[in-house]
Amino acid sequence: MVKEHGHNRRGRSWPRPVGAAVAVVAGAGVVALVLVAERAGSGLSTFDHVGPVEMAKSVGTVEGPNGPMPHAQISLAVYPDSMAGEHGSGGGAHPSWVSYSATNLWVPAHAVVTFTIRQYDSSTATLDPYFNRVVGTVGGVAYYNGRSASALGSQSVAHTFTIHGIPQTGQPTVFVSVPLLGAPSNAPAQANGYPAPAIVRFSIVTGGSGDYVFQCFVPCGTGYNGWGGPMESQGYMAGNLVVGKG
Amino acid sequence: MVKAESFRSQHHLRFVMVAWAVASVIGVALSVMIMKAVLRPAASPQMADQNLTIVVFTAVAVPVAFFVLTFVGYSVWRFRTKGMPTEDGPPIRGNRLAFVLWPSVSAALCVFLLVWGLYGMTKVGTFGTPVGQGGMFGGTRSDPLVVEVTGQQWLWTFTYPSEGGFETTKLVLPVDRQVEFKVTSLDVVHSFWIRAFGVKIDAVPGQVLYTNTTPTQLGTFTARCVELCGLYHAYMQNQVDVVTAASFAAWVQSQAAPVHATAVGT
């Protein structure tokens, strides 16, 4: 009886059972890889951060909804261009694009986090009035130059600072949206060349750790209805927010 | 020269047909069991119909697939040759039974799929028209709760016009009540999908498209965008809560409180 052999690319032969075993092992490997990838599907939210991370600073404790909680503060700015944020004084690839001052934010889990946002841009009417409202903050309000408000008039809003995330990955669902008051267009320029900013301050209570995104919902970019350019580009009017992970 | 064997031999044909029948019975039973285990539970009649469609179509496809695989597998095994073959197999001509059965069975399967699909479409508004107003494909209207769904990069918002017109980012629906979604977009094309409800429809800027469902399971689900729409498309997901009618009324009451804009100057 002639023993059956297969042939490899160099013409050398190996027993058919070996080829079959290799095929079975390779197939099992592919299946295992698919299963591992499926299991790791929740890793969608675990993005790699490009660029510097703006870290919230611990400032002691504060009274939270259920007693004292760690308190942290973080600052951010919104500029009418990209010349003063993390893109550097040259403005990067798109110096004329409106931008947040940072792309990656980190805040602690299970803490009260107070955001202070200096908003240097002038007002743009919101397209969706929902984003005139303050949602998800402590007390349902934000403080605009020291005055509390739960909503702004549509014509007063320059941008929004809106945090949201993926609910099905096991991390807490977070939705925070704060309209950012426009700086008066006739305000005198400061030393940095921008008008005096509107100071927006608000606090949120964080839950467990998770990866979220923040973005603006006032179409302040280019293209159709202003949704293009900086509105659809990370590092301008969109960025990442990590809760709790070091 | 040895006369080439072929499937004209009743022995071969009988063996293959028996093997095909056995494989099909086992395959159909296994496929139904596997499909029922793999498919997630339906939370609406539409999704139940879609799950049933997947199970039935799989069960129908299994004998067709095994028919091909059995013939190919048996041929490869029984008529294998070492080295290059020296001649072609004998041509097959004039098999009237095969000529009648092949197109007839194929046509019957296609008609079955068509009728099944059309029947499914009559049960839900699938052409973007308001529920009950799309002719035979408009579905049946039964006092639906209307929810306006707006897609914008990268979030859905929901407005309840019949409940005071408030807008939210969390979709809350009463159980066992028909819901009509009026879907649009402010920027690019999105696609509104709640898998558990079997609902999926494009959100097109400048147009309003309609679809409907009736949630039948209490719980928390996810609405997501399934049209690649930019940087944070993967994050364009909103929570969907299906609650009792009483809980829904209480939630509406809590949402309906007006929010007054405050004049804050700089």
Image (tube, rainbow, N blue to C red):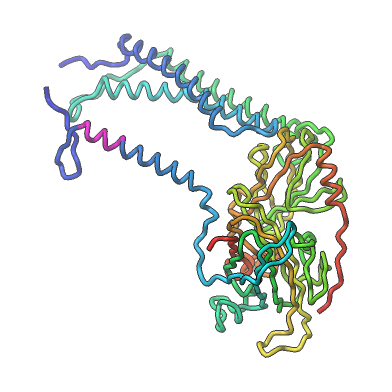
Tell me where residue A122 appears, x and y as whole percent.
75, 77
The quadrant of the picture occupied by the N terminus of chain B is: top left
The quadrant of the picture occupied by the C terminus of chain B is: bottom right
Q: Main secondary structure of the magenta part?
A: helix
Q: Nearer the viewer, residue A231 or A194?
A: A194
Q: Is residue A245 left or right of residue A74?
A: left
State whether residue A33 appears in this view: yes
Tell me where residue A190 appears, x and y as whole percent.
70, 89
State whether residue A226 appears in this view: no
Q: Residue at x 35, y 37 (%)?
A: A28
**Residue, far left:** A1
Q: Nearer the viewer, residue B193 or B96?
A: B193
Q: Is residue B166 left or right of residue B12?
A: right
Magenta residues? A16-24
Tell me where residue A97 appears, x and y as whole percent.
62, 75
Count of labels shown?
0
Can you say whether A105 is above or below B241 in the image? below
Q: Residue at x 79, y 77 (%)?
A: A145
Can you say whether A38 is above or below A213 in the image? above
Can you say whether B134 is above or below A187 in the image? above
Residue A59: image quadrant is bottom right
Q: Residue at x 84, y 35 (%)?
A: B143
- In magenta stretch: residue A238: no
Q: Is residue A213 left or right of residue B178?
A: left
**Residue, far bottom:** A191
Q: Nearer the viewer, residue B209 or A190?
A: A190
Can you say whether A176 is above or below B40 in the image? below
Q: Is residue B208 left or right of residue A26?
A: right
